[in-house]
Image (spheres, grey):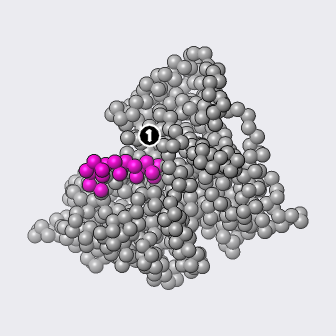
Amino acid sequence: MKKGGEFLIKETTADEIFIPDEFTEEQNMIQQTCWDFLDQEVFPKLDEIDSMKDPKLMPSILDKAGALGLLGTSVPEQYGGFGMDFNTTMLVAEVTGAGHSFAVALNAHTGIGTLPILYYGNDAQKDKYLPKLASGEWKSAYCLTEPDSGSDANSGKTKATLTPDGKHYLINGQKMWITNGGFADLYIVFAKIEDDKNLTAFIVERSFGGITMNEEEKKMGIKGSSTRQIFFNDCKVPVENLLSERENGFKIAVNILNVGRIKLSASAIGGSKRALSTAINYANERKQFGVAISTFGAIKSKIANMASKIYASETACYRAGQDIDDIYNDLVANGTPPGEARLKSLEEFAIECAINKVHGSEVLDFVVDEGVQIFGGMGYSAEGPMERAYRDSRINRIFEGTNEINRLLTIDMLMKRAMKGRLDLMSPAMAIQKELTSVPDFSTEGSDELFYEEKKALRNMKKAGLMVSGSAVQKFMQKLGEEQELLIHMADMLIEGYVAESILLRVEKLIAKNGRDKCAIQEDMAKVYLYEAMEKAEWAGRQAIYSFAEGDEQRMLLMGLKRFTKLQPFNLKDARRRIADYLIAENKYTF
């Protein structure tokens, strides 16, 4: 059985990963349904949605999405949903991710607003609430963040007090940044019962009373997403609406965030694809010096870099999604209840969920930024499509835990698994220390294999990450957690290694199926991404080494880093031009 995080120490083969090119005909039909829905119900109304003049507009669009089943993708059929596998729900999140504020409302409802009940609710709670949530009859929101508790969620001050008759909890407190807050019928609320150290979760109906809220927040982007501060003033919640066990709220919040993180990555991919297609279309139409700007090398370089990053991010996202599904299926086959199995599968790949959240959100930011640049002055104008895309993308690096927090989490989780013996990082790290003082391996055995040099480079990139991490652990021991700058550099090496490996394996699998000639552009994208990933890993490794090593130790580590981040020369300019020429001819992102 696969383990989360083991990609760092174990070589994965192409046949071990799922790639988006393997989606079934049914999944492709679902994808098309989502595109049609956006074209008919969302894209024509973007300005109206953002204006928020009609508070009933977003709920009405969610009603239509519910009628199509888009709100019940994760909900089992017995509760009125479709019970789709994890990667199919990710596909829905990807396509609808192009829907700007609608995507935020949809994901909040189907994810953090529904999944706590699905995964942690008892039978009575599931029977009562899931059918209404799956159909869209009721809309949901998630109330965790408070003015003084953001990343440190367990420090929330909202209180729940049991009434003298023992039949209700009275909830008092303030929550902020609540997506769907203005129109939700149901809230997942986190509060501390009396003097508990940890949060408890509650299912709160708007009809319970004692709920007031501020006006809609004025935000930089996602202006059409309802975002409110919500106040609970002696909100009377029946004791049977306590979700899961007392003081289990923090665990619920953490596990639901694992889902949210990777789903956000999928949404970012959908937004990125649409932004790139829009940019390519404009570049083909916009004339300067008598020719379309898509003929200029500088524009082609941008288009190719955007495409390569999107393709890589998409690959990593669905690779992790299928790994989550595979663990889930194994657990269920061995008798684990489905809800528990889903939580365990997500927890197992929590590292990959965090990696994908960081990468996907930063790719989207890169793509919309370059999209604005391709549009030039029109990119800065609210009359054009890129201005909204640029503003709306920025929140994704904050949603579901900031990217800084997620970077720290990847290393923290990795180290904890190593300490518990779940991952053997020590043996490969010690082997690398020995390798640093040995003669380099100049063997060319297997050099005629596909991607021989690239795979060698990937193995070395992982060695570089283990070398830096192992040396940092030796240096700081238990105080490593205090070195956040260093941990972030270590995380960047980890992220680039995972994503670069993913895209290379995807292309290798495609070539095995379709032949190398038919995959020439995909091969170019994989190589362009790998070379950029190696540069990022080398830079991050250097910054890390500078931060903790001196003298002979520093010189040895820098020599090792140089040795482990070498790549054979490759004409990246020509590869980028080939990628761009293909997409320019198609007039959109086609993969």
**Could you tell me which secondary element the residue under label 1 belongs to?**
loop
Query: Dot 1: few (<14), some (14–19), or many (≥20) neighbours within 10 Å?
Result: many
314 to 222, vertically: above or below = above
Would residue 122 appear left or right of 322 to someone viewing this image?
left
In which quarter of the view is residue 5 placed? top left
Q: Position of residue 498 (x, y in %)?
A: 53, 42
Q: Residue at x 44, y 71 (%)?
A: 70
Q: Position of residue 185 (x, y in %)?
A: 34, 76
Seen as rendered, the residue at the extreme top is 438
Residue identifier under label 1 = 5
Front position in the image: 553 or 578: 578
Q: Is residue 169 magenta?
A: no
Q: Position of residue 221 (x, y in %)?
A: 56, 67
In which quarter of the view is residue 14 placed? top right
Q: Residue at x 33, y 68 (%)?
A: 77
In which quarter of the view is residue 66 placed? bottom left
Q: Quadrant of the C terminus?
A: bottom right
Tell me, yes or no, if residue 184 can be seen here.
no
Q: Is residue 334 magenta?
A: yes
164 to 197, vertically: above or below = below
Q: Residue at x 59, y 21 (%)?
A: 556
Q: Main secondary structure of the magenta part?
A: helix
Front position in the image: 447 or 95: 447
Would residue 542 appear left or right of 218 to someone viewing this image?
right
Amino acid on which the number 1 mark rests in the picture: Gly
Q: Position of residue 501 (x, y in %)?
A: 56, 41
Q: Which residues are magenta?
A: 320-338
